[in-house]
Amino acid sequence: MSESPRRLLLVNGPNLNLLGTREPAVYGSDTLADVEQLATDAAAAAGYEMRCVQSNHEGILIDAIQDARLDCAGIVINPGGLTHTSIALRDALSGVDLPIAEVHISNVHRREEFRQHSYVSAVADVIVIGAGIYGYPFAVAQLIRVAQARS
Ligand code: CA2
């Protein structure tokens, strides 16, 4: 059997490109570039490369997840609002059969009722909620632990 690739995919969903520009009380003042840097550094510290994708389009996210099957060892994803609506995204995540880490910057459980349910959580190996952007490097480290245990 071939070795697991030393590459991870970071997926950020709709509106996360706006990080640092609005709603600082909820999401902080760091930008998407800051998030991607933190996650990339955490991956590099363990000898992994990070591919970063953000899109406001569900199909683009699904294509990136499907492609990860070919050359990634795991996926870190903040699905944004699609967390609470998208069966298609969940099907893509369960279909690739890779370790999955779900991240939410805010504590969704202290927010509106509609944010209390995630379609993604049932297919995630790691879930990090409410740790701000520092949830990303934590999720990366835990994802690598799961990926290495599996290979
Ligand atoms: O807390 C999170 O990370 C969320 O996944 C963020 C999503 C939200 O729909 C989820 O319930 C929780 C929203 C991302 C929108 O990001 C913005 C950032 C700055 C300004 C406006 C939106």
Image (spheres, grey):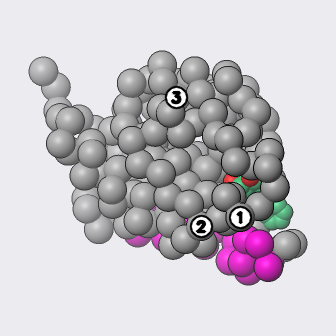
Q: What kind of residue is marked 1? A: Arg
123 is within the stretch colored magenta: no
Q: Dot 1 corresponds to which residue?
A: 110
Q: Quadrant of the N terminus?
A: top left
Q: Which mark is residue 93?
A: 3
Which structural element holds mark 1?
helix
Distance between the alpha carbons at the discs numbered 2 and 1: 9 Å
- 2 and 1 marks in contact (CB < 8 Å): yes
- Across and down, in percent, residue 70 comes to 39, 25
Q: Quadrant of residue 91?
A: top right
Which structural element holds mark 3?
helix
User: The magenta stretch spans which residues?
Assistant: 24-41
Distance between the alpha carbons at the discs numbered 3 and 1: 26 Å
Q: Is residue 25 visible?
A: yes
Disc on the earlier residue, 3 or 2: 3
78 sits left or right of 40 in the view: right
- Label the magenta part by its dominant secondary structure: helix
For ligand 1, which image quadrant applies?
bottom right
Q: What kind of residue is marked 3? A: Leu
- Across and down, in percent, residue 87 comes to 67, 24
Q: Dot 2 corresponds to which residue?
A: 130
Disc on the earlier residue, 3 or 1: 3
Q: What kind of residue is marked 2? A: Gly
Q: Residue at x 48, y 19 (%)?
A: 95
Q: Quadrant of the C terminus?
A: top left
